[in-house]
Amino acid sequence: MRVTPLRISSPTGLLEGTCLGNALRTAVVFLPLAEERKGVIRPLYELAEALDASGWQTMIFDYFATGDSPGKFAEVTWQTLRTDCDSATTTIHECSQEQMVILGVRLGARLALEQAASTPEAIDRLILWEPVVDGAAWLQGLKRRSRFRQGTAAKNDPPRPDDVDG
């Protein structure tokens, strides 16, 4: 499988990514954030290998201030995430000869749904993998897991605003 480093120009800055495979049909992955991102990278690369064997390339990119993309995680907002998704989709749509599918994982699924609604002409299929339905509950769980990892959370402690890690 061909692996190509990828840079996507976005108003938030240059986004780092990887293009796996070499085909006219493209699956774009909208990743989850924080700890959830770590758990899906390997399965997504294995999926990319299977898609490559079926004539699809897979593009995985890091949002502003996540993964290998520069920036400070504290500056990430819903709008910066949406802007990065739009930049990735536009870039691939301009280069893709055939089909584009978006695969959104967890919070990435919520972003994928919004992206599909705003640019339906660019997206042929949408796959939502365990989408986040309640953003507030997701954020509270993320903060709590972060504090437990640090060993600072008691069983019934409410989350604090500074609990999230990138």
Image (cartoon, helix red, strand yellow):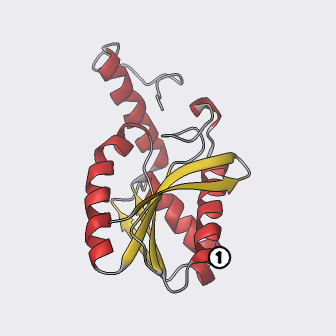
Query: What residue sits right under mark 1 in the picture?
Result: 94
- Residue 165's x, y, as percent? 46, 28
Q: Residue at x 45, y 52 (%)?
A: 107
The quadrant in which residue 51 appears is bottom left
The quadrant in which residue 49 appears is bottom left
Asked if 103 appears above or below 10 in the picture, the reply is below
Asked if 122 appears above or below 18 in the picture, the reply is below
**Depth check, front residue: 149 or 41:** 41
- Residue 106's x, y, as percent? 39, 54
Residue type (three-letter) at the residue carrying disc 1: Glu
SS of the residue under disc 1: helix
Which quadrant is the N terminus positioned in?
bottom left
Asked if 37 appears above or below 159 in the picture, the reply is below
**Depth check, front residue: 50 or 166:** 50
Q: Is residue 41 left or right of residue 137?
A: left
**Depth check, front residue: 21 or 60:** 21
Q: Residue at x 63, y 42 (%)?
A: 77
Q: Is residue 165 left or right of residue 74?
A: left
Circle 1 crowding by C-alpha within 10 Å: few under 14, some 14–19, many from 20: few
User: Is residue 154 visible to the viewer in this orientation of the structure?
Assistant: yes
Q: Is residue 3 left or right of residue 49?
A: right
User: Is residue 156 visible to the viewer in this orientation of the structure?
Assistant: no
Q: Is residue 86 left or right of residue 28?
A: right
- Residue 122's x, y, as percent? 60, 79
Q: Residue at x 31, y 58 (%)?
A: 44
- Residue 57's x, y, as percent? 41, 71
